């Protein structure tokens, strides 16, 4: 990456292929071009995306690729992919309850399947199966309702007995003597994981190749509006940049950015934590989630067990989270997977998730002309990254919501047309 071969206006264009890997290898791997440029901000753009997470970068990529927009900048206050995109537990699935949700997550699922080819970048999408454990009758009823609703919508999801769950995931403890015994599970076989950094890098590289400027270390500190109230540009730590179109994709900091334009968001921001163990040989062949005990686990390609916890009980921007949450999660993991009891944890971290009252995202227009928002993905937006970027690109480029995004308006909290994934799933990774 160090040996940049930039062309002005467009990003470096070396395609990854077996041949290019071979020839670069012969040259000692010294001539790989930089994956994306690091341009200075221009004085004006046709559109600005605030937030270089997966969703913001995917938005810029599809705006350039499918809507022919080239004069776009993606601004981030830190480094690209340094927000929740690089902090999540990488679970991908589409078996949400309501048709509107299933449609958008399934849209993403279809894009995941070919994303590595699309981006010419290995995002390591691994459909190894996501199993959601049921521990009580409420769980059984909720998951069976999901299974039936999903199947009616043409989305795969199946019900397993405890014994079938154990056969699918031999590491699982289905003993009856544990605090929350496993009494069944819902399984989406196409669900799985993807490498989160690679998703951000792949979209960044793809957008850059279309000429999109990705500007890191550039915090948006104000939104300037004209006399009619429409957006006129953004004040940043690197100066004022004029634009008539702004897409805010700032996850846990969305309310802060939107307040700069006087828009109050129905969002609460909570820390959400994850941790990884020391690396071990392959031992866990799927993703296992338990909403009731708030614990999730999969194994990364490096061999680390990737463990997710629940949110803190209180709103905060601390990016760390309470220790007691981690301890409760590890208690649950040790009960469900006794084989991991003596393993050491390597590191833990937190992200700030933006949670809406109905646990569904907000994608679309705002009361301020020229200002669009994509947020509220809460604890579960990584899986939606390609679909979210794809539909939001349409919304920002055309000024009208994409049909799949249309139900996810900000207005629904005024009209009452909620998409209530909260009642159906206490936690929604
Ligand atoms: C611990 C954890 C585990 C998770 N596990 C899963 C999971 O298994 N599956 C799943 O589907 N989802 C999961 N999620 C949720 C998922 O990570 C998010 O929903 C998703 O990554 C959001 O992507 P994004 O691009 O919108 O946000 P981000 O990646 O957070 O990007 C937002 C960007 O905006 C930037 N920004 C903020 N304010 C400003 C400003 N003023 N100016 C400029 N830039 C700004 C930030 O620096 C950041 O880079 C998890 C989240 C966490 C924290």
Image (cartoon, rainbow, N blue to C red):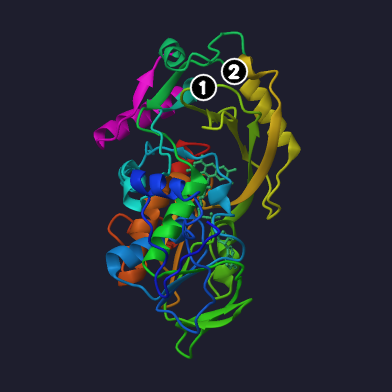
* Residue under the point 24% across and 35% down: 154
Crowd class of label 2 (few under 14; some 14 to 19; many from 20; radius 10 Å): some
Residue 144: x percent and y percent?
A: 37, 25
In reply to whether residue 145 is colored magenta, the answer given is yes
Furthest-bottom residue in this view: 227
Q: Is residue 334 left or right of residue 378?
A: right
Give the image location of residue 268, x and y in percent.
Answer: 59, 55
Q: Which residue is tagged 2?
A: 337
- In the picture, the disc for residue 284 is 1
Do the CB atoms of the residues marked 2 and 1 lie less than 8 Å apart?
yes
The x and y percentages for residue 368 are 45, 76
Earlier in the chain: of badge 2 and badge 1, it is 1
Seen in the picture, residue 104 relative to 255 is either above or below; the reply is: above
Asked which quadrant contains residue 424, the reply is: top left
Q: Which residues are magenta?
A: 140-161
Q: Mark 2: which secondary structure? A: loop
Compare residues 94 and 28 and report the one nearer the observer. 28
Q: Secondary structure at mark 1?
A: loop
Q: CA distance from mark 2 to mark 1?
A: 10 Å
Residue at point 64% right, 76% down? 237
- Would you say residue 108 is visible in this rendering? no
């Amino acid at each position: 990456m160090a040996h940049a071969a930039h062309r002005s206006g467009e990003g470096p264009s070396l395609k990854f292929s077996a041949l290019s890997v071979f020839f670069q290898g012969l040259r000692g791997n010294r001539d790989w071009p930089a994956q994306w440029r690091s341009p200075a901000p221009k004085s004006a753009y046709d559109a600005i995306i605030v937030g270089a997470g997966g969703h913001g970068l995917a938005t810029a990529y599809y705006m350039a690729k499918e809507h022919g927009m080239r004069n776009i900048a993606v601004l981030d206050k830190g480094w690209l992919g340094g927000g929740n995109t690089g902090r999540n537990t990488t679970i991908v699935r589409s078996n949400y309850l309501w048709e509107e949700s299933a449609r958008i997550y399934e849209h993403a699922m279809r894009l995941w399947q070919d994303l590595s080819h699309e981006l010419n970048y290995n995002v390591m999408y691994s459909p190894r199966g996501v199993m959601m454990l049921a521990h009580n009758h409420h769980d059984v009823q909720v998951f069976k309702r999901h299974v039936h609703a999903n199947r009616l919508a043409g989305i795969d999801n199946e019900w397993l007995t405890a014994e079938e769950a154990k056969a699918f995931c031999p590491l699982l403890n289905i003993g009856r003597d544990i605090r929350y015994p496993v009494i069944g599970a819902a399984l989406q076989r196409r669900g799985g994981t993807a490498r989160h950094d690679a998703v951000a890098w792949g979209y960044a590289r793809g957008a850059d190749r279309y000429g999109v400027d990705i500007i890191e270390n550039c915090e948006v500190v104000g939104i300037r509006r004209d006399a009619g109230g429409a957006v006129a540009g953004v004040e940043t730590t690197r100066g004022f940049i004029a634009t008539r179109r702004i897409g805010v994709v700032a996850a846990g900091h969305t309310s802060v950015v939107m307040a700069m334009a006087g828009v109050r968001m129905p969002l609460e921001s909570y820390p959400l934590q994850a941790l990884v163990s020391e690396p071990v040989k392959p031992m866990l062949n799927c993703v296992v989630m338990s909403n009731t005990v708030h614990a999730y686990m999969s194994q990364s390609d490096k061999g680390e067990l990737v463990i997710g916890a629940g949110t803190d009980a209180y709103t905060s921007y601390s990016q760390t989270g309470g220790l007691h949450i981690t301890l409760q999660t590890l208690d649950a993991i040790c009960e469900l997977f006794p084989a991991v009891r003596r393993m050491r944890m390597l590191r833990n971290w937190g992200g700030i998730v933006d949670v809406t009252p109905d646990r569904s995202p907000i994608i679309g227009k705002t009361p301020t002309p020229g200002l669009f928002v994509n947020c509220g993905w809460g604890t579960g937006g990584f899986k939606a990254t390609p679909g979210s970027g794809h539909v939001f690109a349409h919304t920002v480029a055309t000024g009208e919501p994409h049909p799949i995004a249309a139900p996810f308006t900000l207005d629904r909290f005024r009209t009452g047309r909620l998409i209530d994934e909260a009642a159906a799933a206490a936690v929604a990774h």
